[in-house]
Amino acid sequence: MNGLRSLIAGGVIIVGGIIYAIGGMSHISVGSIGIEKHMSGEITEVPQGFHWTGWGVSVQEYPTYTQSLVLSSDKHEGGNSDQEWSVGTGDQQELPVNTNLTWKISTKNVANLYQSVGGKDISYIKNNIVKPTMKNVVNKITHKYSWNDIKGSKQADITEEINTALDKELAKQGIEVGTFGFTHVGSPAGMAQSQAQLATSELNVKKALADQEKAKIENQTKILNAEADAKSNKILSDSLTPELLKKMEMDARQKWGWVTVQGGTPLVQAK
């Protein structure tokens, strides 16, 4: 009996030890880095794989691979809603834009980033650090240029300037910038309406010109037809010589009786 009790007690200890060991393990996914926060307040970084952390330790995992921040009017690109946003310009205009930014968490000092966001996850970092920083930097730079510069020939230079500034600003937060780019730049609200009106006016002008050309062709056709009829009538009139008219009159008299011919048309009188 004592042997059985010892065996049961040993089994309980072993099972308890296994549960304790499993409960104190953490796993960091491939391509991520983990932050352990101990009850004492101590913070340590742990690489990918399984780790013994013990009880009373919280673990936050951060992916270190490239992330994308897409703000687009196309919900298939930017999410489930329209995320198009606007930037200000040096000539007091608001331009609707779609943008794309690639970024990732720097592995140099993830612990500082963890502390600065209060242990929040990657989604919090994206929406509360990366997005507002990007918008602030972009707006600061676009306010130095006209809307036509941003939409036109200087867009590449402006984009490069934004990339440089973003790299500097987000590095302060422990974030590395890949590339920033405009995927679409619209026109100011009033300008877009004016452009639509201009396009409509141009279509109306083209239609009016087409109608004029059609009427011109129709008139020319009528003139040509009238000239052809006049020419035909002249040819016919010139062919009616006095000799021909006399012959037509004689032929008609033989057939119908007393006939006179005027302008090539027999006039019949009853016999």
Image: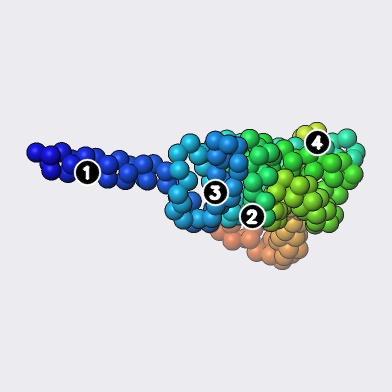
Count residues near mark 1 (Cα–Cα under 10 Å), then give few for <14, some for 14-19, many for 20+: few
Count residues near mark 3 (Cα–Cα under 10 Å), then give few for <14, some for 14-19, many for 20+: many
Label 4 is placed on what type of residue? Glu
Residue at 59% across, 53% down:
64
CA gap between label 2 and label 4 equals: 37 Å
Label 1 is placed on what type of residue? Gly
Question: Could you tell me residue 174's position as x and y percent?
Answer: 70, 49
Residue at the disc numbered 4? 94
Q: Nearer the viewer, residue 76 or 220?
A: 76
Upstream in sequence: badge 4 or badge 1: 1
Tag shown at residue 47: none
Residue at the disc numbered 2? 107
Residue at the disc numbered 3? 34
Where does the N terminus fall, quadrant-wise? top left
Residue at 22% across, 43% down:
11
Tag shown at residue 11: 1
CA gap between label 3 and label 4 equals: 42 Å
CA gap between label 1 and label 3 equals: 34 Å
Q: Nearer the viewer, residue 200 or 271?
A: 200
Label 3 is placed on what type of residue? Gly
Q: Is residue 269 visible?
A: no
Identify the image's colour scheme: rainbow, by chain, secondary structure or one colour. rainbow
Question: Could you tell me residue 86's position as x and y percent?
Answer: 75, 37
